Amino acid sequence: MQIISLPSQAAITYKFFWDGFSPSVKKHGTLFVDKGKISARSDINTSTWDYSNYCLLPALIDGHVHLVLPETGQNFAERLRSYLNSGVYALRDAGNKQGFVKISEPCLVLQSGFALYKEGHYGSALGIGVSTPDEALAAIDNLAAKGADQIKVMASGIFSFQHYGKTGAATFTVSELKQIVKRAEAYNLPVMAHASGDEAVRRCLEAQVTTIEHGYFMSKETLRQLATSEIFWLPTLAPVKAQLADPRLAVKLTPAMYDVIKRSYERHSRLVGEAGALGAKIVAGTDAGAPGVEHGRSLAWEILLLHEAGLPLQTALKAATATAAQACRLTASGTLTPGKKPYILAVEGNPLENPAVLQKPVALFLGAN
């Protein structure tokens, strides 16, 4: 795997080319970069990178990770390098109790800093507790001043691995969530909301958060509301599937727990397929750092899980490229179209036919800042 810093002018030949949203690839051509951006011009006199045996596509985006997890053996540079080596140039950190992390690799990390949770409820491992709306708003002011890229709010607990369909209570009220969204918008910051259980998801929809993270055990009625809204959904399939697929984790489960997790995953997977058919804006987020979910390489797995859940392969790929860029407000990337910055992944084969090619990327091109 090569990581290549592109100069402001460059040309890359290719066998296949996928722009990040089209239903098919182009064949045999050259991608040009001029003045640090992808160009429609073909008369640029510059050095050429020969990738005529490979496919070019947008570099990947992981919409939900926890960079500081697991807490043992922390080496942030190593973890970021794992993302780059997996073809992931951008990731959105979903909050942690350490706050902001110093970034030492050429990887774009959108940081939440401390997640906000309702005092006395789930979330102490990911951020700071607030008891009143005023405390929440003051925390947003503080996070914005420190350079947060988004605000992460814990709108519910997690779902139970022991009791099917049971989720942690919804925490913030609709009124409180609306105040949080309004204050975040004053700083032009999106709001990513951890929400599982129908009530919590419904409250987040009413408050018009930017993204709903997880969304386990929402009802089909709420799913339809989500699909017709402008809100993005990150189903985070990988951390639950890992409990079943990773022998190191599965061996720790009782038969009853395994059954609960399996039924929970299958229900959630069906919802993803239904959401795709309804036109919901689905984004790939791995929840990397959770048990069994490796930093970097798990994004290719999440894309495959989205496809297995019923999303057309093009939609599953968009979930980690064009749609992910929209959700993360990365307006300069996500597609390989004129005017965008050249964050480019090279793989061996056509990902629209075989997503497994994402598991062994060949090169990652990073545009000049």
Image: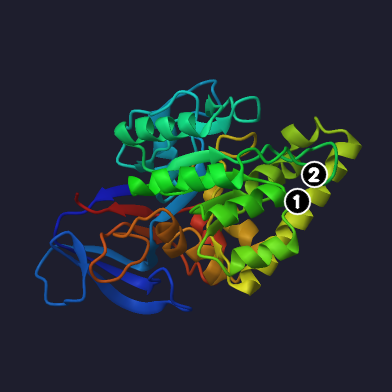
Q: Position of residue 80 (x, y in %)?
A: 40, 37
Q: Residues within 10 Å of mark 1 (few under 14, many from 20)?
A: many
Disc number at residue 9?
none
What residue is shown with label 1? Answer: 265
**Secondary element at tag 1:** helix
Rendered view: 137 above or below 129: below
Q: Pick whichever, 51 or 4, lies toward us.
A: 4
- Residue placed most toward the observer, 221 or 286: 221
Residue 331 sits above or below residue 104 on the image = below
Q: Residue at x 66, y 67 (%)?
A: 224
* Residue 214 or residue 12, whichever sits in front: 214
Amino acid of disc 1: Tyr
Query: How far across and how far down the image is residue 34, in percent?
Result: 15, 65
Q: Is residue 242 visible?
A: yes
Q: Amino acid at mark 2?
A: Ile
Residue at image position (74%, 34%) is: 249
Numbered disc 2: secondary structure: helix
Q: Residue at x 37, y 41 (%)?
A: 109
